[in-house]
Image (spheres, rainbow, N blue to C red):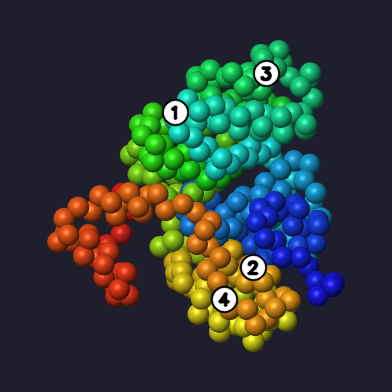
């Protein structure tokens, strides 16, 4: 299969995919819709392995000052010349992922958060001439590089990044926070949820609420934590969950995209099998495939087309929340237990989704 683009198994770096010969399902229309529907703070909740991190990497590559604009050659967004002229490579960007905050206690989790802030400070330092900053901002930047950062500095770190970058560039700052909910899920598993909620809430509130240096923000996660517990007081907040029609096509593969990738790798005859196995999701008004499964299926069948399909997604995520839920169902005759048994037996359960509780 020489000459074909490589399959991007586990690669979440947009620049690497576009510059090193990997297949990319074009999701750049997300940029156009994000700017067109304008929300100052936007949260997208989707399951794991549905391209959230890759999309966040794509957004950073598009907006960040100094970007390599050729990465977008031939993609949908490049056709919108006016939008590209106005937004591509025009803004400072703060981009962090909280997926690595996975610790058995609060102090270790906080130390992991500090390292994430340190890492972003080092990344930004490679763009900045620190000596051009006023002494006050030089001192702030030094604090953001300090591995022994005080908790007060940590909770203000993202807001201070935005103020510092706006001062340096003269442009408001775009903030991207990937997997915002991972520290909270892990804290819930390990018994320090209340302390972690307070820390994350303070960090987010400082950077997202009444921050004059903020252009806009995008957050992603698997779960929507109740607004009352973590997004208190954010009136500029839009949530796009799997039930929303808006943005339904940008996370996961559409049917058309699956047909295209199968055709590209000469696997058109596998379409019905792929649809039967991996078309199990409904986002808004759209049937969606899990990209992780589809890409791995294509890879496995490049040289051995007779292999049976597999559930590639099953071992990519923990089930601690589900296990905790099942173990606390209680009474064998409880409604919840009976409903779970119905699902396991292949039957249907209808429930009202209460957005404010998820």
Instruction: Name the residue tied to disc 4.
Output: 309
Query: Relative to residue 176, is residue 83 drawn left or right?
Result: right
Q: In which quadrant of the rendered view does residue 28 lie?
A: bottom right
- Asked which quadrant contains residue 23, the reply is bottom right
- Whichever of labels 1 and 2 marks the residue nearer the N terminus, that label is 1
Chain-order first, disc 2 or disc 3: 3
- Which of label 1 and label 3 is nearer to you? 1
Name the residue rendered at 65%, 56% in the picture.
Answer: 10
Pointer 4 or 2: first along the chain: 2
Q: Secondary structure at mark 2?
A: helix
Residue ID for mark 1: 106
Dot in front, 4 or 2: 4
Q: Residue furthest bottom?
A: 269
Name the disc covering residue 12, or none.
none
Q: In the image, what residue occupies the spot 58% across and 78% down?
A: 308
Q: Could you say where residue 228 lies in the image, as x and y percent from the top left?
A: 33, 39
Residue 142's label in the rendered image is: 3
339 is higher (above) or lower (below) than 270: above
Q: Could you give the CA–CA distance between mark 2 and mark 3, rounded to whole angstroms? A: 42 Å
Q: Which mark is residue 295?
A: 2
* Residue 7 locus on image (x, y percent): 72, 65
Element carrying mark 1: helix
């Amino acid at each position: 299969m020489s000459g074909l683009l490589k399959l991007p198994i586990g690669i979440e770096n947009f620049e690497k995919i576009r510059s090193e010969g990997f297949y990319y399902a074009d999701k750049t229309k997300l940029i156009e819709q994000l700017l067109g529907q304008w929300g100052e703070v936007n949260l997208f909740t989707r399951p794991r392995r549905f391209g959230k991190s890759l999309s966040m990497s794509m957004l950073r590559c598009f907006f960040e000052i100094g970007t390599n604009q050729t990465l977008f050659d031939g993609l949908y967004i490049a056709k919108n010349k006016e939008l590209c002229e106005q937004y591509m490579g025009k803004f400072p960007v703060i981009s962090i992922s909280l997926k690595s905050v996975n610790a058995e206690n609060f102090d270790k989790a906080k130390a992991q958060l500090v390292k994430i802030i340190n890492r972003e400070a080092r990344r930004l330092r490679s763009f900045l001439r620190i000596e051009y900053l006023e002494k006050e901002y030089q001192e702030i930047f030094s604090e953001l590089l300090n591995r022994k950062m005080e908790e007060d500095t940590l909770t203000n770190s993202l807001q201070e990044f935005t103020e510092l970058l706006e001062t340096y560039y003269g442009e408001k700052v775009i903030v991207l926070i990937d997997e915002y909910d991972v520290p909270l899920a892990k804290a819930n598993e390990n018994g320090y949820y209340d302390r972690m909620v307070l820390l994350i809430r303070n960090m987010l509130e400082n950077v997202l609420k009444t921050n004059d240096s903020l252009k806009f923000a995008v957050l992603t996660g698997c779960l929507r934590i109740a607004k009352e517990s973590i997004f208190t007081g954010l009136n500029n907040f839009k949530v796009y969950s799997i039930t929303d029609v808006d943005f339904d096509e940008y996370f996961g593969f559409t049917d058309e995209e699956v047909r295209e990738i199968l055709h590209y790798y000469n696997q058109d005859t596998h379409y019905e099998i792929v649809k039967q196995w991996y078309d199990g999701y409904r986002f808004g008004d759209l049937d969606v495939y899990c990209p992780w499964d589809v890409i791995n299926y294509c890879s496995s069948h490049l040289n051995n087309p007779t292999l049976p399909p597999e559930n590639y997604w099953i071992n990519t995520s923990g089930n601690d929340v589900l296990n905790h839920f099942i173990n606390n169902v209680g009474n064998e005759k409880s409604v919840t237990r009976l409903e779970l048994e119905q699902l396991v037996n292949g039957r249907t359960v209808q429930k009202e989704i209460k957005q404010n509780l998820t």
